[in-house]
Image: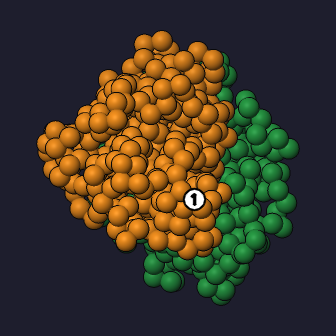
């Protein structure tokens, strides 16, 4: 992946790999953790957990609705179930089950959607979860978490298990640049300031955090000082960090690998609009599906690069 | 067949069944909405389960970890569940008359957040068997001996998720999972045979690997024998298809109203009085 290369970010593991490895680790510490699979454990990387804890791993076949129902029952009887499949399938196929079996009864089911965004590449739009954040945010009580890289995904996985309520964790397929070389202080609901700046704030999550850092570097060469906030938790959103960004920098660009409606951009706009109305611009997929291609080709064609963020910053500062 | 129920027990259950039918009529007519006919078909199934010595529960401790779970997957039959729970002592019978009123935990469909005696929040059909399977697997993981009973409607099994759960339960050979299909022959807009015919139900489930039985769902002795056999099965999940009558107990009143389905309709006041007299 080209993102971050210009500023020397090293490529780390895919966030799905980081999740899978961290899940196996947490499994060793917490015997209440059980995993429900929809026959994609070698894609979601729950395979590491499955290999260590076969009795606590249930591959129920390609049946997302049933997966979530089973998780609901397991949670009601005291387990901490992790339901993992492709973001597109678990959120879109099992949405009513997430509503009735998880959100409405307020059960601590952990939902993990892998292969999120267009950066999965060649498999094409049917496999790309790009509505998932909007859907997860619509469920009352859900925390919605979109980590940026390998270290923060490991931390996010632990935070997800420790969180008392339901969580949606979004992870991706390709290897992604490392933002947090020295680890990170990850708390659900608390944004991380990855870089300080005074002229504009770029609020991003997922792979767009690395793109935002790259954009900030490019902007610096033009004497524009950009703050970068890793808004890994879309819900509950960090209002304090957003208010400070709005007040201190006066302009915000929101970058995400998701559709325009219902994602991070919407959450930021709602918050800033209420607390401190500010000029905003958005870098996202718009209102359309993508196509097959390599991850880099797709990110470029569909407008999710550092250059797109730079252009948005210029629009918002114009 | 040996009868499992003593004469005394049977007499007690017959009386309880009548009382619960009266509760169902009163509750729904008082509320002005609800699903009495869908509730009436399941009365003997629930009375035998809760009062025939099959379901292990503690009314003072609804979250008792070793309790048997009962999940009403056909959530629209909430009135029969509430009436049974009240008679079992989970809450006062007087609370039944608050059905569907603002602030009452007795909502139109079961809500486990509001009413702890309810095991699962249901009402969107097709989901209870999966939830029951989750509980059944949790029992296995924890080495507990509780059983999980799930009551489904015959229209409800149109939902594809039911069949996902049927297949998965067979895979995991959950002997502590017992499904009951209340086969009253009607769904919202007409006979199940006309809307989507899934007969013969037992053959379909047994082809997945389930133990199956088909019984008269209003015959207390048959229901008791079926629960007993299902519990004895042990090494695989068990299905009881209960042939029932929608609106059982008030057929004469439904005759007069000219509607043997009466789906989601409470009896008008006058008809309710006649029904209560029939069930006196």
Residue A268: horizontal and vertical position, in percent? 51, 62
Chain ID for orange: A
- Identify the chain drawn in green: B
Q: Chain of mark 1?
A: A
Identify the secondary structure beneath mark 1.
helix
- Residue located 72% across and 58% down the image: B114
Q: Is residue A220 above or below residue B171?
A: below
Image quadrant holding the C terminus of chain B, namely bottom right
Question: Residue at left 57%, top 21%?
Answer: A26
In the picture provided, is A4 more to the left or to the right than B223?
A: left
| Residue B134 can be seen, yes or no | no
Residue A42's place in the image compared with A254, above or below, is above
Mark 1: few/some/many CA within 10 Å (<14, 14-19, 20+): many
Q: Can you give x and y, in whole percent of width and height, for residue B44 in the image?
A: 62, 51
Identity of the residue drawn at 66% across and 66% down? B107
User: Looking at this view, is B277 or A141 the one in front?
Assistant: A141
| Residue B147, position as x, y percentages in the image | 62, 31
Check disc 1 and report the residue beneath it.
A245
State whether residue B175 is above or below residue A200. Answer: above
């Amino acid at each position: 992946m080209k993102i971050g290369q210009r500023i020397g970010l090293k490529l780390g593991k895919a966030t799905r790999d980081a999740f899978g490895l961290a899940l196996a680790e947490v499994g060793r510490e917490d015997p209440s953790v059980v995993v429900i699979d929809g026959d994609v454990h070698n894609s979601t990387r729950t395979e590491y957990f499955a290999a260590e804890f076969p009795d606590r791993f249930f591959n129920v076949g390609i049946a997302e609705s049933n997966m979530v129902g089973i998780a609901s029952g397991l949670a009601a009887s005291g387990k901490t179930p992790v339901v993992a499949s492709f973001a597109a399938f678990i959120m879109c196929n099992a949405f009513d089950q997430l509503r009735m079996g998880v959100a409405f009864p307020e059960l601590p089911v952990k939902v993990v959607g892998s292969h999120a965004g267009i950066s999965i590449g060649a498999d094409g739009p049917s496999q790309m979860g790009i509505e998932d954040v909007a859907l997860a945010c619509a469920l009352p009580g859900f925390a919605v978490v979109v980590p940026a890289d390998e270290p923060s995904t490991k931390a996010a996985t632990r935070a997800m298990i420790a969180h008392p309520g339901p969580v949606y964790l979004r992870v991706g397929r390709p290897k992604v640049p490392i933002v947090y070389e020295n680890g990170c202080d990850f708390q659900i609901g608390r944004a991380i300031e990855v870089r300080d700046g005074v002229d504009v704030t770029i609020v991003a999550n997922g792979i767009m955090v690395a793109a935002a850092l790259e954009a900030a570097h490019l902007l610096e060469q033009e004497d524009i000082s950009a703050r970068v906030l890793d808004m890994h938790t879309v819900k509950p959103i960090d209002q304090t960090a957003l208010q400070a960004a709005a007040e201190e920098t006066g302009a915000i660009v929101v970058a995400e690998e998701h559709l325009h409606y219902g994602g991070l951009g919407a959450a930021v706009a709602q918050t800033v609009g209420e607390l401190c109305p500010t000029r905003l611009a958005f870098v996202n997929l718009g209102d359309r599906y993508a196509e097959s291609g390599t991850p880099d080709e797709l990110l470029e064609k569909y407008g999710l690069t550092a250059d797109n963020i730079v252009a948005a910053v210029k629009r918002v500062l114009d | 067949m040996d009868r499992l129920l003593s004469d005394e027990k049977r007499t007690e259950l017959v009386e309880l069944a009548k009382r619960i039918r009266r509760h169902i009529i009163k509750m729904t007519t008082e509320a002005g909405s609800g699903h009495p006919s869908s509730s009436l078909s399941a009365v003997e199934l629930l009375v035998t389960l809760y009062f025939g010595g099959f379901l292990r529960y503690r009314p003072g401790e609804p979250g008792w970890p070793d309790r048997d779970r009962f999940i009403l997957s056909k959530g629209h039959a909430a009135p029969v569940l509430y009436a049974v729970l009240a008679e079992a002592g989970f809450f006062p019978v007087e609370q039944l008359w608050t059905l569907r009123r603002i602030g009452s935990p007795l909502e139109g469909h079961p809500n486990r957040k509001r009413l702890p005696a309810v095991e699962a929040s249901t009402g969107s059909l097709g989901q209870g068997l999966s939830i029951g399977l989750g509980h059944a697997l949790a029992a296995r993981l924890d080495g507990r001996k509780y059983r999980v009973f799930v009551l489904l409607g015959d229209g409800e099994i149109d939902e594809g998720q039911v069949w996902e759960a049927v297949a998965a339960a067979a895979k995991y050979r959950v002997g502590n999972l017992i499904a009951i299909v209340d086969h009253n022959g009607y769904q919202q807009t007409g006979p199940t045979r006309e809307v989507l015919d899934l007969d013969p139900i037992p053959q379909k489930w047994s082809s997945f690997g389930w133990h199956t039985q088909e019984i008269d769902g209003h015959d207390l002795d048959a229901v008791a024998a079926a629960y007993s056999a299902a519990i004895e099965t042990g090494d695989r999940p068990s299905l009881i298809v209960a042939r029932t009558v929608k609106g059982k107990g008030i057929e004469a009143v439904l005759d007069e109203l000219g509607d043997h389905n009466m789906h989601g309709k409470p009896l008008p006041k006058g008809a309710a009085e006649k029904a209560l007299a029939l069930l006196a």
